[in-house]
Image: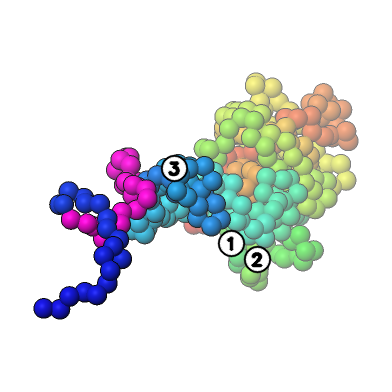
Amino acid sequence: MTESQRPSGEYPMYPSYGNGDASYPPPPSHQPAQPIATDPGTTVWPGWGSDADGHGGGGDGGYGSGLPQPAPEPAASRRRARRPVALLVAVAIAAGVVGGGTATVIGRLTGNDTTSTGSGVVPGTTVSQSSKGTVAGVAQAVSPMIVEINATSTAGESTGSGVVITSDGEVVTNNHVISGASSIKVTLSTGRTYNAKVVGTDADKDLALIKLQGASGLKTATLGDSSAVAVGDQVVAIGSPEGLTGTVTSGIVSALDRDVTVAKDNPGSQGQGRQGGGEQWPFEFGGRQFNGDTGNSTTTYKAIQTDASLNPGNSGGALINMNGEIIGINSAMYSASSSDGSGSAGAGSVGLGFAIPVNTLKADLGTLRAGNSS
């Protein structure tokens, strides 16, 4: 048995911790800090220092102020937090796309589409987008389709107007413009002249169809719908008053369905507006005669009334809406100077002109093309 040679007392003795024996290593000088119970998901240790070296300045044993510190947030929670934000951004983008498309559709339905260009042509018409709704735009578009008609008969020479409706030279005019003519010459807006033949006439409606000889590739007018015309609509009249080819005037539709009576036969001066001061074509309205005696053979039709200026020579020309469509064939005008027996030297429009509705013409075209005359 080996015995220790160390003198007694060289090994320190520690007090017992309940088992009666000495304990090693010795206990710490301070009680270890214990977690403080807080809300779920957060752990706080008391006395955690806030100094730069990790030791607090106001506690015991180097521990800090003991303020609660939240536990680090798990990465999975951060990823889950981003998803609602991404979803909101996607929804906002989709709403912007849908909103933009809706605005485009509404703009097109209301005619306020900002993507339209001014160089295009209004669908179904001859008026450009940039000039739509203006007298200048209508005049520029339709003037090439309006011609001057010079008819010669035993009574002399008279001037009227006409509207080109086919590229090979069909021209619509009033019956009274070409009635009794032995020869007809037609001048285009370009100045080119053609001889013309009568195809058909309808004295009951004061309409006639003539055909230019050897014509081709002509610009043609668009026939509109006179049933859609309303009082107050703005209109343009184009014709050759007193031989002034391509004269443009404007006004409004002042009344509809006016009963106008005109002579069916030549009452001695054929055509409305004889150059050199001849008589105008007479008509009756409201039981009174204007521009002379209508004679015994007359016909009555319902006309569009306009305050657009019409003068001798406008007969057979066009009354046009602001889309460039023909809505009537000008046929009569009131002249105060001629109704009082003072002659036609001072003839001119006083705001009472009349036009045959274009729907009447469209319904009569088959008869006129068939070569029927009445």
The residue at 63%/70% (across/down) is 216
Instruction: Specify the label residue 66 is tagged with.
Output: 3
Which residue bears the numbered disc 1? 166
> Hey, what amino acid is under mark 1?
Thr
Q: Is residue 97 left or right of residue 357?
A: left
- Closer to the eye: label 3 or 2: 3
Tag 3, which secondary structure? loop
Which one is in front, 261 or 216?
216
Q: CA distance from mark 1 to mark 3?
A: 101 Å
* Sooner in the amino-acid sequence: mark 2 or mark 1: 1
Residue 225 visible within the image: no
Residues at marks 3 and 2, CA–CA distance in whole angstroms: 100 Å
Please name whichever residue, 142 or 244, is drawn nearer the observer in this view of the structure: 142
Magenta range is: 21-42
Tag 3 or tag 1, which sits nearer the N-term? 3
Q: Quadrant of the N terminus?
A: bottom left
Neighbourhood count class around disc 2 (C-alpha, 10 Å): few under 14, some 14–19, many 20 upward: some
Residue 177: % across, % down: 69, 47
Of mark 3 and mark 2, the one earlier in the sequence is: 3
In the rendered structure, find residue 123 and report the number of the disc placed on it: none
Q: Which residue is mark 2?
A: 218
**Which amino acid, mark 3?**
Gly
